[in-house]
Structure formats: structure tokens, C-alpha cells
Image (cartoon, rainbow, N blue to C red):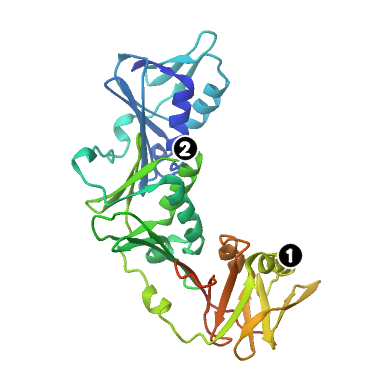
Amino acid sequence: MKIRIERLEFLKRLRIIEKVITENKIRPIISCAYVETRGDKLFFCGTNLESTITTEMKCNEVEEEGKIVFQYQLVEEYLKELKDEVVTFIEKDGNLLIESSDSSSEFSLMDASDFPKILVDENFSEKTEIFKIESQELANIFEKVKYAAALSSDNLAINCVKMENKKNKLKFITTDTYRLVYLEKELDEITEDIEVSIPLNTVESMTKLLRSIENTEIKFYFINKSIFFKMEDVLIISRVIDMLFPNYKGILKNNNYDKKLTIKAEVFMKMLKRIIIFVKNNSESKYGATFQLNNGELKVNGVNEIAKINEELKVEYEGDNIRIALNTKFLTDFIQNLDKDKEITLEFIASNNSVKIRENQREEYIYILMPLALKD
């Protein structure tokens, strides 16, 4: 390989694919960036085997074609410090030479033939996307749901974001068995029914990527049990989790809530932040606090080994008195995604039953939270 390229554009493309690259000590080549000439363009690929990001850029000149795999961190640091707008890449004797007007460097390469054969060349011009969505809108949705997914891959069935549609409503669901988030988004057109579980690692990588680029349109495809998020010059590919997701519909259909607290999101959030100071290091029940609703008054108690806090507030409340223990961090995870000027409702059944939380009178974004064990 011998090419001349725009330095800053190369850095931009490298930063796109590195969003998905993770350290892999068993197969070190997975921790590297793959770059290949394709005509007058340079093709980039990064993968963690579960998800893959590809992108491309135009070369100033391709004197010799080729493909290289390299540890990108040092290359990125070096290119950031050069002053030339155009630099030369040369592959020679298993090494990468990068030359500018006043600097020359050499980096070891790995055998490009050992890079996983996962490079997909789908002709998307011949396919119809299932739906289209703006990239920042999708990033917002992922951030509103991903925190409730199981973090460990020990239970793959819930280490994901469930995505499905009904007519033109796209639904996103996550759960870790202690809580459940449901969000629906209405789109102009969805061409076919879908029901897929997107790995949490893919969602995390996508969110980072989408936040780092300008807002653009994304087209979604589902082909051969893989999902594709296609942007103008970036493609995100992921496998899906082919395991049964919990019956979230049964949970959402629970109509036994007979007690309701209405409170302004900002007021409740400020209260929770104060309480978290005291309960975040509680050895017995980390982040746990006791909430008591009695005759229109909310009392919240939190303790740790050396301090305690008591909060009292007049609120709008309907139903019998109740005392319940809840995870305050789990509460803030959801409430911080709501409009702080809006009122929210918390609906209860009993001290040992789930709590339903949402913006008042709205059903498109719902949080179901399981209580903690009460302590005397």
C-alpha cells in the first residue's frame, strides 16, 4: 500500500470505528483497526465480533493498493501532532510508514489476512429500509432506556434493548428484572414488522458514535439475522440476541395500582439527590431509602453508618397510606430523562409490589420499579 490522504479526515474516520473496538487479549487483532484501499477510497473497519462499524474516505492519491491492520492508539496520537494537511502512508516489510514534510514514523502491522471475515458488502440501493430516523433522536431514545438493561452478559436475554413495532409505533424495552423501561416512538412509516433484541454493547457503542457526529438520517435494515444502521458514509452492523425476552406486556397491563402520588419532577429530583448523599454507601442496602405516604405528606428516610436524613413534603396523593423502600439511584435514572417542569406520577399497589412511574397523563414512556425489602 502507498497512498496520500488528508490527515484530519483520516483521524475523523479512525475515531468513528474506534467506538466499537475493545481490548481483546485472546485475539489481539480484534483490538486493532482494519484499513483497505477500494478504488480511490479508503475503507475502515472496527469490530468486537458482536458489532462492527465501517466507514470510508476519499484518498488524494492511490499509488499502490493494499490492506493493513494496526494498533490505532499510537497512530492516532502521532497524527494529531503533525502539521501537514496531507500525509503519505506506505506499507513496507510488515510495517506502516507515515511520512510528512518534517517527520517520518514506523509502526508494526498485524497480518491483515487474520482479521475476521465479517466485512459485509450489502448493496443497500437494492433494498428497502424498514424505517428511517434521525441519528440524534435515536441516541436520545437509547439513553432513555439503556440504563435498565442487565449489565452482565451472563443473562443475554436481558443484556439488550428490545426493539419492536406495532403499525407505525416503534417500541424500545429494557429490563434487569429489578426494573423495566418502556418507550414508544411514532414514525412516519415502518415497512414491515420487526422484533429484535440489540446487544447492550452495540447500543453503548452506537450512542457514543451518534453523539460524536453531526445529526444525519439513519436507515434501518434487518438482513440474515443481522441488523444494519446505515448512514451516508457510516455503517453499523450487529448480531441480534436470539433468546426469549421477558413478557413485558403482562407487566405493563397490570391495572392493580390504586394509590397515586403526583409531584413535580424537579422537586422530586432535588429531594432524591440530597437523599443519595446519605444512602449511596449504605452497606446493608446501597441507595435504599424508605418512602412513607400519609395524609397528603411524603416522608423519606435515608441512613448510613454515620449519618441519616429525613425529608418531608406536602404532596398530592390519592389512596391508602403506604410505606415502601425504593432504590433512589434507580429512581433518578428515569426521572432525569423527564422534563423537569412537568408533573410526574408514581402509582403504588402495596409495599411489596411494583411502582409505576411516568409523566402525568402520558403513556409513551413508562418505568416499572420493584421495591426493596422494608427494614423496621
What's the residue at 44%, 25% (across, down)?
10
Mark 1 to mark 2: distance in Å? Answer: 37 Å
Check the image and name the residue furthest to the bottom: 320
Q: Residue furthest right?
A: 306
Determine the image quadrant of residue 243.
Answer: bottom left
Label 1 CA crowd tier, 10 Å (few <14, some 14–19, many 20+): some
Q: Residue at the left extreme?
A: 126
Tell me the kind of residue under disc 1.
Answer: Ile
Element type at mark 1: helix
293 above or below 141?
below
Which label was assigned to residue 277?
Answer: 1
Mark in the foreground, 1 or 2: 2
Depth check: give the residue in front, 360 or 368: 360
Write the residue at 64% across / 90% down: 321
Q: Could you tell me if the residues under marks 1 and 2 are in contact, i.e. CB atoms within 8 Å? A: no
Earlier residue among tags 1 and 2: 2
Left or right for 335, reference 217: right
Q: Position of residue 56 (x, y in %)?
A: 35, 29
- In this picture, residue 176 sits left or right of residue 45: right
Badge 2 marks a residue whose secondary structure is: loop
The amino acid type of the residue labelled 2 equals: Glu
Would you say residue 205 is visible in this rendering?
no
Residue 239 place in picture, x, y as percent: 31, 52
Q: Residues within 10 Å of mark 2 (few under 14, many from 20)?
A: few
Q: Which mark is residue 214?
A: 2
331 left or right of 104 in image: right
Q: Is residue 324 left or right of residue 192?
A: right
The image quadrant of residue 157 is bottom left
Residue 52 pos. (x, y %): 36, 43
| Figure quadrant of the C terminus | bottom right
Residue 225, percent from left and from top: 25, 54
